[in-house]
Image (cartoon, grey):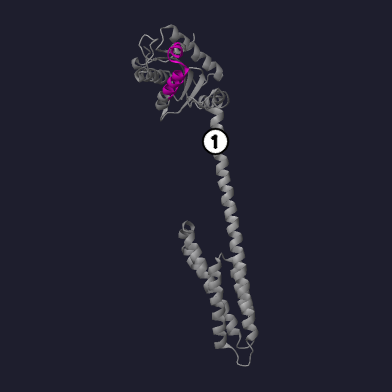
Amino acid sequence: MLVCALLMRRMLASRPQAFLHLTTAYAVIICLWGAFLSAYAHRNTADISVYVYVTLCVAVILPLKPWQALIIFLADLAAFIILMQLFRNPQLDVYSSIINGGITTLLCVTIAAVLYYNRGRDYLNRMTILQQNREIRNINEQLRRLVYIDNLTQAHNRRYMDEILPDLLAEALEGGEPVSILMLDFDLFKQYNDLYGHAAGDNCLTAFSRVVQNFMKGRRAHYVRYGGEEFLLFLFGMGEAEGMKAAESIRQMVADAGIVHAGTDTGTTTVSIGVRVARPGEKLTLQQFVSDADQALYVAKNAGRNRVKLFYAPGRPTQALPKEAAAP
């Protein structure tokens, strides 16, 4: 049985049921071996110590279901009595051996049943604890969402930006990776609410968020509702050219969405976007980067809205932008 276990160890590791079958087979073999030795000893003396030791060890050590224990130990007792009749000295009184063997069998069945149910309870308790841990993790995840997610737009909120994003930004910049910070603001949103009502305004923000979230798919991005109709989009790994191109894509996607807005020149909802690129080596806080993006947004608004502007500070070199990335 030891050789079988060694040869089959890989299969047994992935098939616990096969391990249990092998254990049951081992229990049968070792019990019959103990019964044989004790019966053979009756040629000279009525000694059943081997039978007792072996069956008790099997009951205590090996995992047996109650019905398996009952069958194995009763069969073991029957084999012991039959073999004892074959080998015993006719002058020996084997009545005491049969009584002691029966008591041992009953004791072993009881021990196996008690251990099985205790193991079963332990297993159920572990499963209950694991289930409770999963439920706790789910509740914590829901609480995390409640803490960091804006209910209306499903974007992250200011708390997420203040507590989580500074570390993410610092980690990216220290790793030599640029981050494009886009500040997006609906054009003439107050007039939209005045024309269509605040419920329609909420629907407009939700539709806009779906556009941005669709754009984010497959990209390393974090989307934050900064306040009211203002949003921030953090695009990791994007420099000036990529950030401007991404901003222009979002601006065009919002325009193509065709959300009616009678208060604009185009007759549809538009968005203005300010872009600030955080480069590796810059020693500014997240709030300063956001403030710069807000300045670029202010320029876009003053330039006529529905356009993208890149933040530029005197003395700060700016990468050349491809034509397709330039703002309208």
Residue under numbered circle 1 = 141
> Quick check: 88 above or below 163?
below
**Closer to the camera, 245 or 143?**
143
Is residue 1 highlighted in magenta? Answer: no
Residue 57 seen in this snapshot: no
Name the outermost residue toward the bottom: 91
Point out the stretch of residues depicted in magenta.
191-209
Residue at x 55% of width, y 43% of height: 134
Q: Assess whether residue 201 is covered by the magenta stretch.
A: yes
Quarter holding residue 269: top left
In percent of the image, x 42 and y 25: which residue is there? 210
Q: Nearer the viewer, residue 271 or 180?
A: 271
Q: Amino acid at mark 1?
A: Glu
Q: Is residue 48 left or right of residue 213?
A: right
Residue 327 appears at what percent x and percent y?
38, 13
Residue drawn at point x = 51 percent, y = 17 percent: 228
Q: Position of residue 16 (x, y in %)?
A: 49, 59
Eyeballing the image, is 122 above or below 162? below
Secondary structure of residue under mark 1: helix
Coordinates of residue 155 in the picture (x, y in percent): 49, 25
Count the labels in the image: 1
Q: Position of residue 168 (x, y in %)?
A: 53, 27
Identified at 52% across, 66% down, the residue is: 23
Please identify the dominant SS of the magenta region: helix
Which quarter of the figure is the C terminus placed in? top left
Looking at the image, residue 53 sits to the left or right of residue 20; the answer is right
Question: Residue 20 or 127: which is nearer the viewer?
Answer: 127
